[in-house]
Amino acid sequence: MPMDNREKLLQAASRVYAELGFRGATTRRIADEAGVNEVTLFRLFGSKAQLIAEAVTCQDPMGHVTLPEEPGDVEHELTAWCQAHLHALRQHRSMIRQTMADLDEHPEMGPHLCRGQTPHFNELVQYATRLVERHPEGEGGDVVAACSFLFNALFSDAMGREIVPGVFPQPEHEAPVRYVRTFVRALGVPMPSPLASVRATGAPSAGEAA
């Protein structure tokens, strides 16, 4: 279906802002990019600041991948989650960098960018909490601190690898699984096998079912 003017303006604002920042993203330039009259822009959003804030909020810089409610194949699930988020963050890198560059002059932009990332962090905390609860024999690491480490490792990798590649795990394609293994160790639990994880949920093994 064709986009309505509101959606056209949001997408255009996201592209122009990512390229030119707050100052360069004039309402005329955004309206021209969207193929929409500038008067319509103000009628729908009221101001450039409101339009850009909504455009940033609409972008989920970490994508749509989710973790299962109950941990299963922990290394596979977390590695896939990390890979997907790294990919999404890199796709939105220009917009994220522009927002960070504009924070001194426009601190109100920060919460709009963070709003899309907070649910992903909370999801990771819930997953890690369930994982730790399954292993009372473990050391019981600091869940929030471990999740903060992983979250910030992904963000820093996506934003900074091309600038300072030497401070990140090499080769690049091995970084997600190395982050995950360090994360699980920080939680103080062993890396469970898929079979052990299935048994932890109470599901019978093939032998038990027979």
Image (cartoon, rainbow, N blue to C red):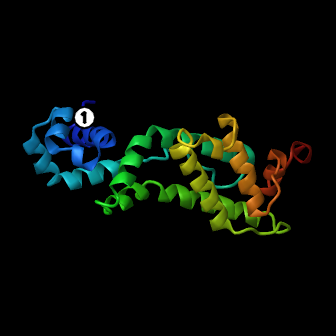
Image quadrant assignment for residue 125 = bottom right
Q: Position of residue 22 (x, y in %)?
A: 26, 49
Under mark 1, the amino acid is Met
Q: Residue at x 61, y 45 (%)?
A: 82
Image quadrant assignment for residue 103 = bottom left
Of residues 168 and 192, the one nearer the viewer is: 168
Image quadrant assignment for residue 210 = top right
Identify the secondary structure beneath mark 1: loop
Q: Residue at x 41, y 47 (%)?
A: 97
* Left or right: 165 as drawn, with respect to 92: right
Q: Position of residue 136 (x, y in %)?
A: 82, 69
* Left or right: 89 as drawn, with respect to 141: left
Count of labels shown?
1
Of residues 99 and 186, the one nearer the viewer is: 99
Quarter of the image for the N terminus: give it.
top left
Q: Is residue 19 visible?
A: yes
Q: Residue at x 75, y 50 (%)?
A: 181
Of residues 175 and 67, the one nearer the viewer is: 175
Q: Position of residue 98 (x, y in %)?
A: 36, 48
Q: Is residue 72 visible?
A: no
Task: Name the residue carrying label 1.
Answer: 3
Q: Would you call the spot at circle 1 few (<14 residues within 10 Å), some (14-19), or many (20 or more)?
A: few
Q: Residue at x 55, y 50 (%)?
A: 156
Q: Position of residue 77 (x, y in %)?
A: 68, 45
